[in-house]
Amino acid sequence: MASRLLSFRAVATALAMTALFSSCSDDSDDQPATPAVGVSWTVDGNNVTASQVQKTVGTTEVSISAAAGSATSASGITLTVPKAVGTYTISATSAADATYTTATSGSAGLYGATSGTIAVTSLTATNIIGTYSFTGTDAIGGTATKTISNGKFNVAL
């Protein structure tokens, strides 16, 4: 009798563990995971996560401004995108726009996007989610460029 009870417990435990692990399976076949709330990007090989995010919601567009860093060394991203799901190419004539800014003690940089994309993957009454990448050229008179990649946003509206 004891061996039957042990076998039953072993089978029940195995079934419970199988159910638990199958419910925690990896999502590689599913949609990509929703990005964390906030704004992040990669520049010059460094991953940056914004510590401050602001947004302006208009009738036809959404502007997102995000900043990271400290009082002596900071950077920021500004994105403007149509208020609709879609992929938008950044150009002089498009409704999508982006800038990257830097500020350190005694100097500042402003890089206006000259090429790139902003994709709005989800837009609800409560938030906007998407990705972006672009190359910005020094708008203060230089020829330097910055490449922003791996950009993600999930911002409450």
Image: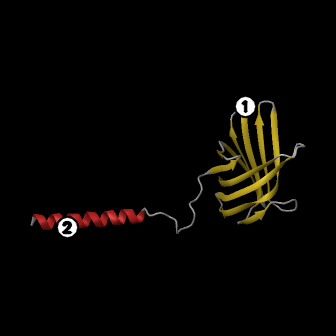
Kind of residue indicated by mark 2:
Phe
Residue 35 place in picture, x, y as percent:
60, 56
In the image, taking residue 38 as reference, residue 75 lies left or right, namely: right
Q: In which quarter of the image is the C terminus?
A: bottom right
Callout 2 secondary element: helix
Badge 2: how crowded within 10 Å, few (<14), some, or many (20+)?
Answer: few
Q: Nearer the viewer, residue 34 or 43?
A: 43
Instruction: Please tell me how many numbered marks the rendered image carries.
Output: 2
Residue 109 place in picture, x, y as percent:
81, 41
Above or below 131: residue 51: above
Residue located at (82% from left, 44% from top): 110
Badge 1: how crowded within 10 Å, few (<14), some, or many (20+)?
Answer: few
Residue located at (63% from left, 49% from top): 38
In the image, taking residue 127 as reference, residue 88 lies left or right, namely: right
Question: Mark 1 or mark 2, which has the lower sequence index?
Answer: 2
Label for residue 8? 2
Above or below 89: residue 145: above
Outermost residue to the left: 1
On the question of residue 89 being in view, the answer is yes
In the image, taking residue 129 as reference, residue 1 lies left or right, namely: left
Question: Where on the picture, by quarter, is residue 101?
Answer: top right
Name the residue that disc number 1 marks: 72
Callout 1 secondary element: loop
